Amino acid sequence: MSEKNAPIDVTSPNAEDAWVSVIQKMDEAYADLVHSQVEVEEKNAELEESKLFFDSVQSSMSDVLIVCDQVGAIQRVNRALERLTGKSSEQLFGVHFTELVDSRYLQKVNSFLTQIKLQPVKDCELELKTQEGSVPLSMNCSPRRNHRGRLVGMVLVGRPLGELQKAYIELNSAHAELKLAQERLVQSEKMASLGRLVAGVAHELNNPISFVYGNMHALQRYTDRLSQYFDAINEGQSREALREMRESLRLDKLIKDLNSLVEGTMEGADRVKEIVNDLKQFSSSQESEKQLFDLTHVIRTALHWIIKESKRPIEVVEKIPDKVQAFGHSGQIHQVVVNLIQNAVDAMSDSSRQCLELTLKQSDYQIEFTVTDSGPGISEENLSRLFDPFFTTKPVGQGTGLGLSISYGIVSEHGGVLEIKNCDPQGARARLVLSSQEPADV
């Protein structure tokens, strides 16, 4: 047996040293392993602590945090966003961040991904869709890069505008209440104006209704005579008897009158229908689309109602051409015209001469309607306050002070002009200007 392959004598001093060395190496390796394990556990504990720390920081943030990938899909959000939207992070995961933004700001936020390649976005004001409506935010957007510096997404941090947000909601609520109150005031003033015309309208309706009523009584008598004659024919009476009955019942005259009675009845019914339609149009609270309408008919209807209701003789000078069309809401303009004519009539209540002059002029693009009275005119101190809400020169209980204010608002909304000036030597003139054409963009 060669010396190289000879067995080691474990009892020799060299062998003992070798085993001691091996054991020492094993101890060192074990110690290193234990040390590494402790370090890993410490690192895990630090990581866990860091995670809990960042989670608690995100949870405590009042600012909204949205982390997106390079195409804008949401990867992570904080609790502030969950509370605002009412959705959990699981529900928001993968949703494109623009779905949370009010549609009015989409064009602005769609450029974020392109813009952050050049520079971060700072203090961009937009509105976030939430459970309770849109909430204004001041949004900052920064690029998110990996360890190699590659753009992998973006981080959006939005700060609710605090007191401004509360004021914004309160302002919206106040605006809605004010708008509702304004609509009620407009309708109330319209009904007040309508109430002043009831007597005239009732008188106007009474004429055609009485005419129809009288014609129907005549038709009923004629029907009785015709029935009597037809019964005689059915009984087979002689031609001579029928001729005598025809003469005694005056059937020839009756037959000639039938057409005129029917035509008169139809005319009266049409007049009633026309009056009711005008009244319905004036009193309606529903908004209709603006369109071309016959301003001449509106003016003459309003004038007719007011003059019928007036208990004083009023001289009316009318310079109004037939069939002049204006563009707008006919019912609203009717209300304006009624207010202008009624105010002119009221202004002449104590005048010895009561003359009302109405003129209507048409140009290529606009219509001018004026109402001139022979009253005492308007004092200089009141002239500038005529369109103020609740301002009136009438005695208490005879005016709401809203008629001219509402009329001014209606005309302004139509893009027209309404002004009142004194005339020389006396009286006042109201001037209304409206468009005579439909706008090209309508």
Image: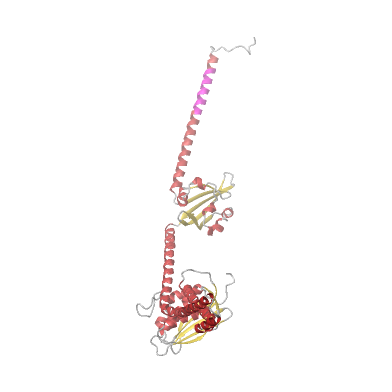
Residue 385, visible in the rendered structure: no
Q: Residue furthest right?
A: 2
User: In the image, 234: left or right of 165?
Assistant: right
Q: Seen from this angle, which residue lies furthest left?
A: 396
In the picture, measured across the screen, residue 32 lies left or right of residue 351, that is: right
How many labels sit on residues? 0
In the rendered image, the vertical position of residue 397 relative to residue 122, given as above or below: below
Q: Which quadrant would residue 111 be assigned to in this image?
A: bottom right
Across and down, in percent, residue 234 comes to: 53, 74
Asked if residue 212 lies in the magenta stretch, the reply is no
Work out whether residue 135 or residue 258 is closer to the camera in this orientation and state it.
258
Residue 389 at x, y = what percent? 41, 74
Residue 334 can be seen in this image: yes
Q: How is the image coloured?
A: secondary structure
> Residue 56: where, in percent of width, then height?
44, 44
* Residue 30 among those drawn in magenta: yes
Q: Compared to 226, does 162 lie above or below? A: above
Q: Quadrant of the C terminus?
A: bottom right
Q: Nearer the viewer, residue 275 or 177?
A: 275
**Residue 353: percent from the left, percent from the top?**
42, 90
Which residue: 52% across, 46% down?
93
- Give the prevailing secondary structure in the magenta stretch: helix
Q: Quadrant of the N terminus?
A: top right
Depth check: give the residue in front, 76 or 332.
332
Q: Residue at x 55, y 57 (%)?
A: 106
Span shown in magenta:
18-33
